[in-house]
Image: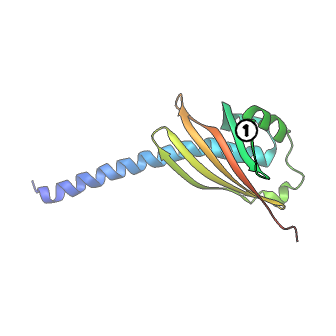
């Protein structure tokens, strides 16, 4: 047996297995993030409830003031069951920009570019009872010119 070839092959197999496991976890992390995007596209609160853990908060700073809102309040307020009136101008402007996973914790960056505002959302996710859920959302809203 030629160990000169077996050791590199063994190392390659370890890395390949790790990459498959990572891509599988990334696919699982994408599920709540995609449900969040579907909630925005459709206005359906059921998608938002699938995305967010039952307990959690949305956090932001506006005009220098720190603000916090529970997910339940946010979902009730933001997702009325109908898409936004300008959905046709929004539909192609939502994307998951990045995902970083370590064990049962992950972060994701989502960008939503709408006619009058660009939202950058930072989601914290945890794997709870075998399922990934958004447990915290912080965001920045950047006004856009309507010209």
Where 120 sits versus 67, above or below?
A: below
How is the rendered protein coloured?
Answer: rainbow
Farthest bottom residue in view: 147
Residue 144, horizontal then vertical, whole percent: 81, 64
Residue at point 17% right, 59% down? 5
x, y percent for residue 94: 71, 56
Q: Is residue 14 left or right of residue 73?
A: left
Can residue 114 be seen from the camera position used here? Answer: no
Query: Relative to the observer, which residue lies in front, 21 or 115?
Result: 115
Q: How many marks?
A: 1
- Left or right: residue 59 versus residue 27 is right
Image quadrant for the C terminus? bottom right
| Residue drawn 76% across the image and 51% down it | 64
Q: In the image, residue 85 lies at what x, y percent?
A: 90, 52
The quarter of the displayed image where residue 21 is located: top left
Crowdedness of circle 1 by 10 Å Cα count: few (<14), some, many (20+)?
Answer: many
**Farthest-out residue, right:** 85
Measuring 80% from the left and 59% from the top, which residue is drawn there? 117
Q: Is residue 80 above or below residue 142?
A: above
- Which element carries disc 1, helix, strand or loop? helix
**Relative to 17, is 94 on the left or the right?**
right
User: Is residue 36 among what the camera can see?
Assistant: yes
Q: Residue at x 11, y 57 (%)?
A: 2
The residue where tag 1 is placed is: 48
In the orientation shown, which residue stands out farthest toward the left?
1
């Amino acid at each position: 047996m030629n160990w000169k070839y077996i050791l590199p092959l063994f190392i390659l197999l370890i890395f390949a297995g790790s990459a498959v496991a990572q891509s599988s976890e990334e696919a699982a992390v994408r599920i709540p993030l995609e449900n969040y995007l579907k909630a925005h596209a459709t206005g359906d609160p059921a998608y938002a409830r699938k995305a967010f853990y039952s307990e959690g908060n949305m956090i932001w700073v506006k005009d220098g003031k720190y603000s916090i809102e529970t997910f339940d309040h946010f979902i009730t307020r933001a997702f009325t069951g109908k898409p936004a009136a300008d959905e046709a101008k929004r539909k192609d402007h939502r994307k998951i920009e990045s995902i970083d996973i370590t064990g049962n914790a992950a972060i994701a960056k989502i960008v939503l570019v709408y006619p009058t505002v660009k939202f950058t959302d930072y989601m914290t996710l945890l794997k709870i009872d075998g399922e990934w859920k958004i447990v915290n959302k912080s965001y920045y809203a950047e006004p856009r010119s309507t010209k």
